[in-house]
Image: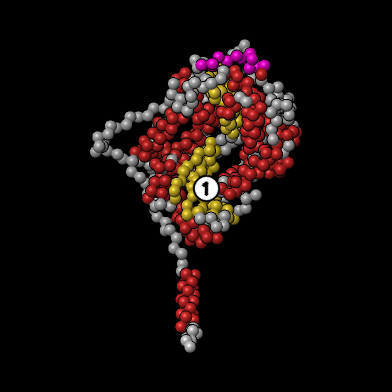
Amino acid sequence: MMNLTPVTHGRPKQLQSLMCCVMALLLSACQQTQIVFTPTEPPSLASFEIPYPLDNHLPESGVIIPATDPMFSDEVHTELDLPYQLHRLASVQSTYDLSSNSLSNRVSLAAVSPQAPFNNPDILQIALQEKARALAISLADPCLETFSIRVSLHSINLSLTCPDDVNHIYGLLVQFWQPNTFVDATTAPVDIDNIRRQLKLNKHLNAFSGAEIDKVWREKLLGPEHPYNKVLNNDELFDSLNLNQLQQIQQQAAMQAQWHLFLPNSQAKNAEFNLQASIKLWPLLTTSLPKSLSKSSSHADKLETTTSKQTQKIFLIDAPGSVQTQVRLGYRIDHSINHAIGHTVDSELGDMSEKSQLSSQEVALSCRSLSALMGRSFSGRLYYDLREKRGLTYGIYGQCANAPLSSSIKFYGSTAIEHTGAFVVGILDHLVLVKTQSASQGEINALKTYLIGEDLLSQDNSIQRENQYLQQIATGLTQVDVQKLNAELQALTPKRLLQLANGAFSGEPLIILRGDVDRIIPDLTSKLPEWQLERVKVD
């Protein structure tokens, strides 16, 4: 009889034991291996010196001249007491508008508050969008399907673009600002439960997407008591919001606002506007603000920042398991800043060691030129070096936030966890470089071309035209100021840019990172040993 019993199991068991020993050794070796993070390198700049004629015989581009004509013409009717300032699209613009249908009329009604920010504009934005949906269902008017809303801290702009008569479009827009628009159940009532859900959902989405870093940025940059941080993200109100409170928020904004009505050129089809009828349709605003929501009107009187003096500190938002680090780095630019140039700049710049007052125009010039120089996408210094040369990021950009109560320059981007230290050091090195070394004339010329070209393109888009105009109103810049700003931009020199850099980038930058803190701390400690690391929690 054949014996089917296996002869022995000894050899497989020995093999298993041997494999276990090898795996244990490998795991032990991995645990002992030091992770080598991306090394830092000196900053490098692109060359903007292009010889002419080029090898391919392309012609030399001419100088781009900034526009001098106003975007809108203001209509004045002294015989009527208009509740709004009426603006007509300048005739020269109507031919070149690439963003709108020539058969349609665009009408915008904007509320602007230059002196103080609107209270709870984030709530009002969701509520007005919900009202537009309710009106579109109730009235079955296709014009309401084109509803557009653009909200900032100092402006709320509602627009409709359709072939209808401008008087009809105007009549639709004023419905959003009627005193009973949210509480009257007979006039397209809004779903308050849906508004609350959207507000809560947005908060969760921001935490998931990483947008919460911008909330921390604003709080650290300005301080928790700054007006801009007091009027947003009212979580308690998000939970308890009712129709009466919503109506009070709307009425407060309406009473606080200066009103601006934007109409198409008078030669456009159906563009004849009935002024008398528009006054009769104007909302009858309440004469007093609700006490429970009137606190924001005093915010503009408290402009002192409560942020403590930084001592080389990096704020960290923990996102365990994140494969990348979000970076926000920049400076606050006030109308009174310390130009601490000291020994870092040649004496030819003059004595600027004392505090000097910057005008709105100077703040705007610094903010625009420096954010573009460093972070204007493909041709900016940071993008060229940190992406094109070193591959530390998919993109890094600059943002100029020029607001009535505070201005700032922010550079933002994301990098892999292992690149975090090198990425931050790379930005800091470029900020030192721009304050200590003059830019080449070729780079200055490229900067001017970019900024002036950007300004010209914005005038070919109806939305950007209005945004730019409302920004001028909010910051107090007149058309003359804008022309002076463009003239200064055209006259920009390497020496002047060096002065602007040392004024705007004085002191220490604010740095906020969001990523897997436990993984990035060793690299930050190694590459930035003089900087303190502080974890912050997002509410």
Looking at the image, residue 152 sits to the left or right of residue 40; the answer is right
Report if residue 69 is visible in the image.
Answer: no
Taking the spot 40% from the left edge, 42% from the top edge, the residue there is 378
Extreme top residue here?
A: 79
| First to last magenta residue range | 269-280
Q: Position of residue 296 (x, y in %)?
A: 68, 35
Q: Is residue 276 magenta?
A: yes
Where, by quadrant of the figure, is residue 277 drawn? Answer: top right
Where, by quadrant of the figure, is residue 186 drawn? Answer: top right
Q: Which one is in front, 416 or 349?
A: 416
Q: Is residue 61 magenta?
A: no
Q: Position of residue 150 (x, y in %)?
A: 57, 32
Looking at the image, residue 94 sits to the left or right of residue 153; the answer is left
Taking the spot 64% from the left edge, 33% from the top edge, the residue there is 130
Q: Position of residue 248 (x, y in %)?
A: 72, 32
Taking the spot 45% from the left edge, 27% from the top edge, the residue there is 98
Instruction: Please tell me how many numbered marks the rendered image carries.
Output: 1
Secondary structure category for the residue under label 1: strand
Where, by quadrant of the figure, is residue 63 drawn? Answer: top left
Q: Position of residue 97 (x, y in %)?
A: 46, 25
Q: Which one is in front, 342 or 412?
A: 412
Residue pointed to by mark 1: 328
Vertical comparison of 270 with 427: above or below? above
Extreme bottom residue here?
A: 1
